[in-house]
Image (cartoon, rainbow, N blue to C red):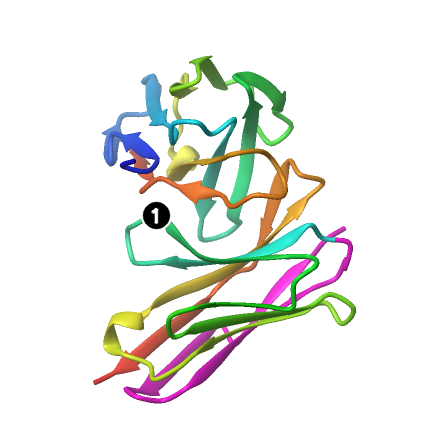
Amino acid sequence: DAGVIQSPRHEVTEMGQEVTLRCKPISGHNSLFWYRQTMMRGLELLIYFNNNVPIDDSGMPEDRFSAKMPNASFSTLKIQPSEPRDSAVYFCASSVDRGNTEAFFGQGTRLTVV
Amino acid sequence: KQEVTQIPAALSVPEGENLVLNCSFTDSAIYNLQWFRQDPGKGLTSLLLIQSSQREQTSGRLNASLDKSSGRSTLYIAASQPGDSATYLCAVPLGGNDMRFGAGTRLTVKP
């Protein structure tokens, strides 16, 4: 397996534009996580899916953020409209099941909103 | 509230040295503890996962230990190499939904 695949690797966009980040989890993994990493706050969980269903989205900072998982092999994180303070590295991770098993991370998407 | 602390924040050692990275957590009721490596500009690579019932895990030159009662884990790197230079993070799950990460230790191994 190629691991967790995220695209794009880098995204530079203007304030107010819509941004869509994509993630393909490892085949067979039931849980998918979206994280955001900043220097100030470290790694923070944004949302967590189990069997394609959003379980916990309490980490989503604002209504401008939304995430979907239409099937077991694809998830998107959308920011609309984007703001400069959204600039961060966004990671997607997957695991066989929540909690007790190892989490595997994608390479991340570095988002810069200017 | 679970807090995860890593000490030191940065460490620089000459090649060949054995070293220990420390991770402490405030709530000992954890399922497991995971150590990651992060290279600059890249994602996190899982190094070792220790289940709550285990005391240590080994992978090559890496050995991670877990002492739940004292809220501590250590990552031991034997015979360090310049290629080991990276940031090392420990993380514990919170109720199975979230993972709380430490701030990381930035390791530099000098040739």
* Segment colored magenta: B1-29
Q: Which residue is mark 1?
A: B43
Place residue A92 in its image quadrant.
Answer: top left
x then y, percent, for residue A104: 43, 43
Q: Does the rendering let one see residue A61?
A: no
Q: Is residue B94 left or right of residue A72?
A: right
Is B92 located above or below residue B69 in the figure? Answer: above
Residue A86 is covered by the magenta coloring: no
A2 or B85: nearer the viewer? A2
Q: Residues within 10 Å of mark 1 (few under 14, many from 20)?
A: many
- Quarter containing the N terminus of chain A: top left
Is A69 located above or below residue B24 in the figure? Answer: above
x then y, percent, for residue A75: 41, 20
Q: Does the rendering let one see residue B16?
A: yes
x then y, percent, for residue A99: 63, 40
- Residue type (three-letter) at the residue carrying disc 1: Gly
Q: How many numbered circles does the render carry?
A: 1
B72 or B41: nearer the viewer? B72
A54 or B51: nearer the viewer? B51
Place residue B7 in its image quadrant.
Answer: bottom right
Please tell me which residue is depicted at 55% across the width and 37% down the height of the picture: A45
Residue farthest top in this picture:
A70
Chain for disc number 1: B
x then y, percent, for residue A81: 40, 18
